[in-house]
Image (tube, rainbow, N blue to C red):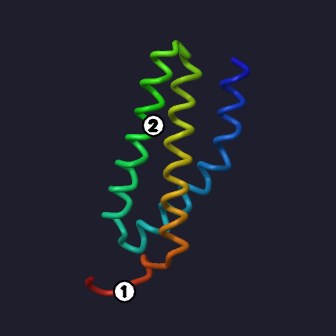
Amino acid sequence: VAAIWLLFALMQPLNGAVFALDGILIGAGDGPYLAWSMVVAFVASAAVAVAAYALEWGIVGVWAALVVLIVVRLVLMWRRFASRRWLVTGWT
């Protein structure tokens, strides 16, 4: 149970950053990028979930997969935000 709380606590600041970047990119109309980044994050998270199942990590494995989902989303959205390609106005 302690390991779950550690993962949960470490995930909260990351969640805040992900939700903030998510809101910025949604507001900028960058939905297609968000959709594809979520697919990539899901694939990474699913791989961890399958490995966790095979290794019998139990609930800790589920939370580890969720942390991977959040971290991958954060990295991809931060890269998009830093690239400033989302600032293009009008039809592209």
Q: Nearer the viewer, residue 10 or 83?
A: 83
Identify the amino acid type marked 2: Ser
- Furthest toward the left, the residue is 91
Identify the amino acid type marked 1: Thr
The x and y percentages for residue 43 are 38, 40
Image quadrant of residue 58?
top right
Q: Residues within 10 Å of mark 1 (few under 14, many from 20)?
A: few
According to the image, label 1 marks what residue? 89
The x and y percentages for residue 30 are 37, 69
Q: Nearer the viewer, residue 73 or 90?
A: 73
Relative to 66, say whether 51 is above or below.
above
Q: Image point 42% across, 76% down: which residue?
A: 86
**Label 1: which secondary element:** loop
Q: Image point 41% across, 66% down: which residue?
A: 26
The x and y percentages for residue 63 are 56, 29
**Label 2: which secondary element:** helix
According to the image, label 2 marks what residue? 45
Relative to 41, say whether 83 is above or below.
below
| Screen quadrant of the C terminus | bottom left
Judge left or right: residue 34 versus residue 78: left
| Screen quadrant of the N terminus | top right
Relative to 81, say whether 68 is above or below.
above
Judge left or right: residue 88 versus residue 1: left
Q: Image point 49% across, 61% down: which residue?
A: 77
